[in-house]
Structure formats: structure tokens, C-alpha cells
Image (cartoon, grey):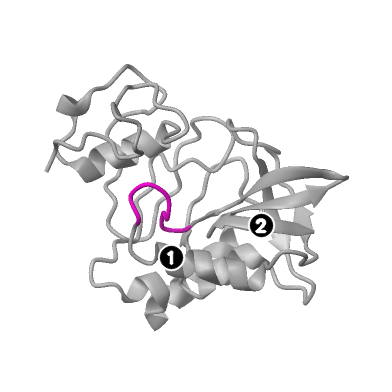
Amino acid sequence: MVERVVDGDTLEVQVDGRTERVRLIGVDTPEVHGQVEPYGPEASAFTKQVLAPGTRIWLEQDVEPRDRYGRLLAYVWLADGRLFNEVLVREGYAQLLTIPPNVKYVERLTAAQREAREAGRGLWALADAASPAQPAPATGAGNEKAGARHATGTPALRYDPNGPDRDCDDFATQAEAQAFFEAAGGPARDPHGLDRDGDGVACESLP
């Protein structure tokens, strides 16, 4: 049962009497925390509308059960039999984010994204919509953003967020630094020290 929605692709649910945070497999919605991205609020509102507190859902897991943050990784099935991960992509609220080995429904999600893009739905209607994300390299269990490119124009990562230490001089723009910062665990974690004042925004001096 749904307890609350954190953002477009993350929610908290009751599982066996305890609260678990769930990250939807195979999808990525624009951010609403820290640096708000275009269409992020709309995606979050849609998920909150469909998955209101008390909504009964069914969770299906894939090969990797959790990501490196301890979140459950799952496909969410609705009472009417629809796969919510697929609904998000088909309606243009999320972009495909494929990270092996959790690829059970990659063909369905790919087809849903193609349909959304061709119809110009949601984030695909944005003027700066980028090409669909390519399958990202597995940098560890979970739905990470490393190697992906947002439909809203977030830069692809040049550096491995789990690799050598980086500082603000390594990035050309604040947006690039922010994408790296979030992929490395920000704002909850900042192993590279890019957010000195702890406000969730990395390398604020960059253009």
C-alpha cells in the first residue's frame, strides 16, 4: 500500500508492516529536489494523483532487488492491471533509463517511449528535448543516472561518480556539475565536496 510519493519515480510503501522506499525500475523523471528540472513538477503531480496514499499496488522485482542507497527496485502494478512504470513513460512523464541486469520489461518501456515521443507527449513536447537515453553502464545495483541523458537537456556524465575525486574546475557548467553531484548521491551525500554550503546546488560559481 502506498504511504506517500517522494517524486515522479520514487515512493514509500508499506511492505510487511514496515515502510520501504521504492525506486521505479527502468524510468527516470525530471528532478523536483535541488535544481528543479523542466516537467519535474508535472511528473511528480501525476504520480501523486495515480498513487495517492492508501492506493493498493503490487511490486514486482527484477534481478537486483535494491540500489546502493538501500531502496527497493521494483515495477509497480496497478489494480487495473497496468504497469505504472510503463504508464509514466507512455504519457511522457518519464524517460527510459535502462540499467542491466534489471531489464525484464525494457522492450515494453522502449515501445512506450517511442510512442510518447512520436506523439509529442509531456516532456517530449519541450523545445530542448534530447534524444532518448541509451542503456547506461552498470555502475552498481540500482537506477542510477550515470551514463544517461535527460530529455530535459541535462548533460551526459563525463566522469564516473564512483571514480577519482573531482572538483568544480573539472566541469564546464553548473548543470554538468549538478548532474554529476546527483549521480554521486547528492544532496544526501557529497563525496566530492561540490556543495560546500549544503544547499543542494553544486558548484554555484559555474555558469
Q: Quadrant of the C terminus?
A: top left
The answer to whether residue 141 is seen in the rendering is: yes
Q: How many marks?
A: 2
Q: Which residue shows up at 28% across the image and 36% down it?
A: 202
Q: Residue furthest right?
A: 16
Residue 145: image x %, image y %? 43, 43
Q: Which residue shows up at 61% across the image and 58% down it?
A: 5
Give how far apart the Cα atoms at labels 2 and 1 are.
15 Å
Residue type at the position of mark 2: Arg
Q: Residue furthest left?
A: 207
Numbered range of the magenta stretch:
29-36
Disc 2 is placed on an element classified as strand
Q: Residue furthest top?
A: 164
Q: Main secondary structure of the magenta part?
A: loop
Residue 205: image x %, image y %? 14, 36
Left/right of residue 146 with respect to residue 8 in the rendered view: left
Pointer 2 with pointer 1, Cβ within 8 A: no
User: Quick check: is 65 in the magenta stretch?
Assistant: no
Disc 1 is placed on an element classified as helix
Residue 167: image x %, image y %? 23, 23
Q: Earlier in the sequence, mark 2 or mark 1?
A: 2
The answer to whether residue 111 is seen in the rendering is: no
Q: Which mark is residue 41?
A: 1
Q: Which residue shows up at 80% across the image and 72% down it?
A: 79
Q: Which mark is residue 4?
A: 2
Left/right of residue 35 with respect to residue 27 in the rendered view: left
Label 2 neighbourhood size at 10 Å, few (<14), some (14-19), many (20+)?
A: some
Left/right of residue 6 with respect to residue 83 in the rendered view: left
Nearest the eye: 167 or 3 = 3
Residue type at the position of mark 1: Pro
Residue 83: image x %, image y %? 68, 67
Q: Which residue shows up at 41% across the image and 58% down it?
A: 30
